[in-house]
Amino acid sequence: MRTQHLPNPLRPTVPPPPRAQLFPDDESLLPEGSVVDGRGLTTDVIDSADYVVVGTGASGATAALVLAQAGYSVVMLEEGRWVRTREFGPDVFPAMKQMYRDLGAQVTIGPAAYAVMQGRCVGGSTTINSAIALRPPEKVIERWGTAFGLGDELTVAQLEPHFDALEKSLRVTQIGDSIAGNHNTLMEAAAKKLGIKAQRISRYDGGCEASASCITGCPNGKKLGMNITYVPQTLKHGAKLYTSAKALRVLSSWGRATGVEALTESGRFLTVHARRGVVVAASVIQTPGILKRSGVRLHALGRHFQAQPGTSFAARFDKPVSMDFGATQGFNSTHFVESDRFKVESLSLPPELLSVNLPGIGPELTNRLHDYRHLLNWALVLRAETEGRVVSMLGKEMIFFNPTVTDLARIRRGYRQLSELMFAAGAKEVWPNVRGMPTLRSADDLKHWDNAPLEPTAYSLMLSHLFGTARIGPDPRDAVVGLDFQVHGLRGAYVVDASVFPTNLGVNPQHTIMAVARLGATRIAERPLPRV
Ligand SMILES: Cc1cc2nc3c(=O)[nH]c(=O)nc-3n(C[C@H](O)[C@H](O)[C@H](O)COP(=O)(O)OP(=O)(O)OC[C@H]3O[C@@H](n4cnc5c(N)ncnc54)[C@H](O)[C@@H]3O)c2cc1C
Ligand code: SF4
């Protein structure tokens, strides 16, 4: 049922898309009986398939499609529900309630609580992300080969055809002028002025209509997330999907995975027997818990958690910016990734989320929000060196993350750079959302950054680029998954999400996650049946 809510008076009225239009996630376009809503099950259910895939996000949907295309029967399990394109609207909190894990309130444990954003719906985080598609720096993949024992098993050359195929099928396109929007083009102009290498962003783009609302789901069906691409395509290849069905554990017999036990939202048990294997793709936070509940006791499980924390702040301009028009994220600079481990990005935020980045309370804050058209918000993404840990207890994941001083210093350096870009773009006021930092009114004020605190609680970080809790490697003493993507000691159980990444990347991860999942699933599809 659609959530009813009052219109947001601060948001300009954008004409809704024609609702008569059918999108690829409409029930009438999917094979009959291919989707079972776990909220409606009234008895326990037993099913079977060649492969069971847990999770329908970037990695799970990619792997499921490869296996279904190879001719195997596939059952997909998804903890969240399938929120259809026709249900997407611009308001943030109803969207978070339906599509984000813990309603968007999942946080880290440590000296500071940082938000950990993840999708919990069909399509996973791709349903609510900005669709940025970037290949990783080659040096990162090469280092996986030399420093983590991956050797010739996962190389730049092997990933290449998978990137090519993804880019073709998901129409990776650099944003054009007509959908750029001022929040993007102002960064382009500022980078040029300061001589900073920067690029328009390439995205999974089915004809973006510049509504700047990717993070609440694309109401126009133009963002090519898994919810409207690989999931429906997998179903058309004969697969089945259970939604609102949380995988509890991988079932096994004599060291071989035999299926998955899940619990539906209606409280019924669902058992899916797997003739050939189980592919776990539930994300860096949830995958370790599933493996732990399945009896996997490897030392590296849940350890080596890495992230690329993001953080953003706002500025005021005299001329209108109108960041509610344009691709949500359309411009970025990787200029500083190599030297300082951060990249900067434009990021349109709706008023509800932007308010967190504005100073003041009461009428002062309200007045600033009323000035929404003149405000702009840009972000920083850090390739953090910090390693944390994900621990699963009583079915709930706890994420320990305590950034090092070096990481905080890099954020501070990045914030200074971002402020400089804002002034170069013509900002009149810059509002750092760092404790103790004053409003900056000109480039002369950039010196205040030198005194910004280096304490975790002074910064508001958001973690959505996540890596490493079931990392790949030949040695079970410091890796969870072998070079064949099979869990050490549990034949027929595979992991293909970013848990397997030995390190973070320095760029937005979806593209690499999908390429690795595609490579892994292709190899799984070619394997002989695991020995019983
Ligand atoms: C707001 C936001 C914006 C982002 N923007 C970008 C971007 O523009 N470009 C980019 O490259 N990256 C972006 N990212 C990151 C990117 O979306 C993720 O890195 C990527 O989707 C992770 O893929 P995944 O398959 O590991 O997990 P997900 O895509 O999160 O999918 C995991 C799925 O598994 C399901 N699941 C979990 N546990 C269970 C269980 N026990 N049983 C059944 N199902 C389960 C979840 O509900 C979820 O649907 C963004 C992330 C967020 C949150
Ligand atoms: S900005 Fe483009 S891709 Fe994003 S929601 Fe709007 S139309 Fe869809």
Image (tube, rainbow, N blue to C red):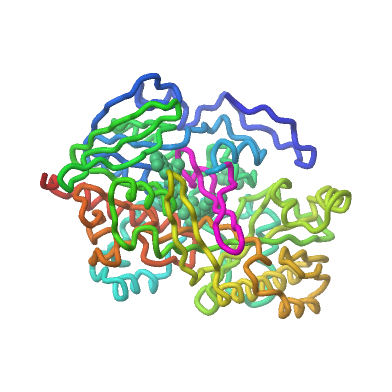
Would residue 326 appear left or right of 98 to someone viewing this image? right
Instruction: Check the image and name the residue furthest to the top.
Output: 42
Q: Which quarter of the figure has residue 193?
A: bottom right
Q: Position of residue 304 (x, y in %)?
A: 40, 65
Would residue 365 appear left or right of 502 to someone viewing this image? right
From this viewpoint, is residue 328 visible?
yes
Whether 349 is drawn above or below 12: the answer is below
Whether 153 is drawn above or below 524: the answer is below
Q: Position of residue 295 (x, y in %)?
A: 28, 49
Q: Position of residue 123 (x, y in %)?
A: 45, 41
Q: Nearer the viewer, residue 210 or 377?
A: 377
Considering the image in quadrants, where does the C terminus appear?
Answer: top left
Count of numbered tags: 0
| Magenta span of residues | 103-130
Decide whether residue 107 is among the magenta residues.
Answer: yes
Would residue 123 appear left or right of 336 to someone viewing this image? left
From this viewpoint, is residue 173 visible?
no
| Residue at 83% from the left image edge and 66% from the top image edge | 428
| Residue at 27% from the left image edge and 50% from the top image edge | 494
Q: Nearer the viewer, residue 184 or 56?
A: 56
Instruction: Check the image and name the residue furthest to the front.
Output: 394
Decide whether residue 19 is among the magenta residues.
Answer: no
Q: Which quarter of the figure has residue 377?
A: bottom right
| Residue at 70% from the left image edge and 56% from the top image edge | 182
* Helix, strand or loop: magenta stretch: loop
Q: Position of residue 121 (x, y in %)?
A: 48, 38
Would residue 304 appear left or right of 216 to someone viewing this image? left
| Residue at 56% from the left image edge and 68% from the top image edge | 343
